[in-house]
Amino acid sequence: MGSEQTSSRFASGVVARPAIEPPVEDFAMISLESVEKMLRDTGGGAEGKPPASDLPPPIFAPTAAAHPTPPPKPAQSDPAGTSRFRFADLLRPDGAVDTEAVYRFGKVPEVKLSAELILQALANLPPDIPELARHAAIQITVNSLTQAAGIPVETVAEDARVRHTRLTQFHEALTAEWERENQPQRQTIVKLEELIAAKQAELEAVRAQLHEREAKSIVTHRDCETKLSALQEVIDMMEAKTPEKSEAD
């Protein structure tokens, strides 16, 4: 990273804005691409340099015996006595990517002037600044910082390419890992949805049977009431005293 003198010179040339850490795909990777392009336009060509994609990729896998941070004390580490890489080690509690941890695990070389300073310049520019003005501001910042640090622009450009490569590798590995970890849950959801659909069909069938029985029950009750009423009428007539019977009594 840059020295205090470089940092203060950088800060004096850019208006400070609240630092909000955006998601990696919305800021870090896209911004690194912007830095690469701007540095190339500033004069940092990649001729004679091996591309960052030629770097041997780190093993971004949960089974890798590596840890991005200093290993804990053996007594409090993994019961098996091994330090295992976890994607959670490279993520903050809110899910944001800990890019510095990614770069440490990816063994990004230390440079005198990191592309991170250019990322800070991109973040501190007003969001509504025109593209040409944005490009010019970054070029001025890059020239100023590289001259102050006494290094060629290509050094920062290569640093941006390496970081972009490592972050891309991490993003792809993390996506694949999430797909693998989430597959059982997705299968469970499919099975539950199928079970719910089957139960819903069963529910509708039972509801239809109940509706049919209730309809028949209404007919049965009405028929019984009609017949009972008729029989009661007969009983009433048979028990009623006729005039002849009254005289005989």
Image: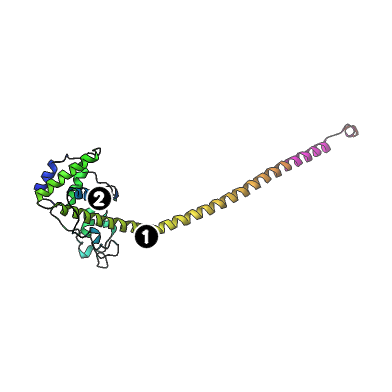
| Image: 123 above or below 179 | above
Q: Amino acid at mark 1?
A: Arg
Per the picture, the main secondary structure of the magenta-coloured stretch is helix
Which class describes the residues within 10 Å of circle 1: few (<14), some (14-19), or many (20+)? few
Q: CA distance from mark 2 to mark 1?
A: 29 Å
Which mark sits nearer the N-terminus, 2 or 1? 2
Asked if the stretch drawn in magenta spans residue 241, the answer is yes
Q: Amino acid at mark 2?
A: Glu
Residue 180's tag is 1
Q: Estimate the x, y position of residue 133 in percent, counting from the top left.
A: 21, 39
Give residue 132's quadrant in the image: top left
Lateral position of residue 229 relative to residue 123, left or right: right
Choose between 121 and 190: the one closer to the eye.
121
Q: Nearer the viewer, residue 246 or 92?
A: 92
The stretch in magenta equals: 224-245
Callouts 2 and 1 close, C-beta under 8 Å: no
Q: Is residue 33 visible?
A: yes
Q: How many marks?
A: 2
Q: What colouring does the structure picture have?
A: rainbow
Secondary structure state at the residue bearing disc 2: helix
